[in-house]
Amino acid sequence: MIKFFLHAKHWHIFLLIFVIPMGLNFVMMFEMFSNITANLNFGEGNPPDPTIMFDHMKYLPLIILTTAIFQFGWQWSVGTSLHSKLPENTKMNIKVFKAFLIVPFIYTIVISVGMGFLFKNMSELMQMGAQMDGQSPPDELPKFLMFILIFILLHLFSMVCIFYNIYFIARSLKSVEIQETAKGDQYIGEFFLTWFLLIGIWFLQPRINTIFSETEIRE
């Protein structure tokens, strides 16, 4: 898998990370709105059934998870492989990079599973909400607020991890190319290209292909 990401063309990565997930999302949305339109009772004044939408949205977590696998897989492959080619005087903590890559990936899995459960049981949750309308807050409210706080903190930490990984890849790429420790003003362009990978992959991947030619790969 690592070898694939290192030697794949820019359009291969673009297809895997962006085009295929966007296509699946378009198909899901098209099917959802088609079913909603088909079940509308025109002229009777009845609103559309929201459960139809939630029934289709249960596929969204799978799309998100698939995108995350390819994107984090690319980052893992590029980051770890570039680290092995860094100049001797360039010190980059590969253990921190790996840990900070695993954290947002696990976070994405948790979010995907939670979204899947939410969409699958949305009808029951809506009924419970209607029954509790006008009633006093349940005893579980403090626990729920604590869960929300933990979720926000985990989200913020995942964002820190993602930006560190972007920095790691950008600085490693530039350091390998110039064969010395890259300074901030030297890899700022690579940082933004890695951050906005939708555009950056067209510029970064050819440079990665050049560094990791077939003759340099040893399994």
Image (tube, rainbow, N blue to C red):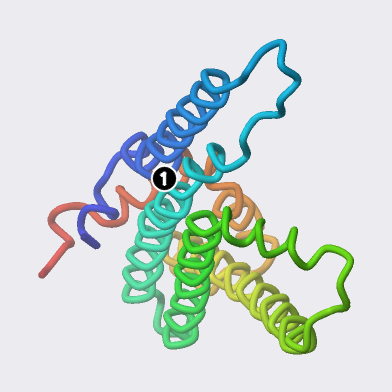
Q: Quadrant of residue 176?
A: bottom left
Residue type highlighted by circle 1? Ile
Residue 198 vs 58, above or below: the answer is above
Residue at 60% x, 47% y: name it: 196
| x and y, in percent, of residue 105 in the image | 46, 70
Classify residue 70 as left or right of residue 197. Answer: left
Nearest the viewer among 63 and 116 is 116
Residue pictured at 71% horizontal, 81% vertical = 153
The residue closer to the viewer here, 96 or 48, is 48
Is the residue marked by circle 1 packed among few (<14), some (14-19), or many (20+) residues within 10 Å? many
Q: What residue do we see at 22% from left, 53% from top?
A: 4
Q: Is residue 123 visible?
A: yes
Q: Would you place residue 92 above or below residue 51 in this image?
A: below
Q: Secondary structure at mark 1?
A: helix
Quadrant for the C terminus, please.
Answer: bottom left
Would residue 91 be visible to someone looking at this image? no
Picture quadrant of residue 54: top right
The one nearer the camera, 24 or 133, is: 133
Front residue of 43/183: it is 43
Mark 1, residue position: 17
The N terminus: image quadrant? bottom left
Residue at the image position 62 percent from the left and 39 percent from the top: 50
Residue 213 in the image, given as x and y percentages of width and height = 21, 52
Above or below residue 90? Residue 30 is above
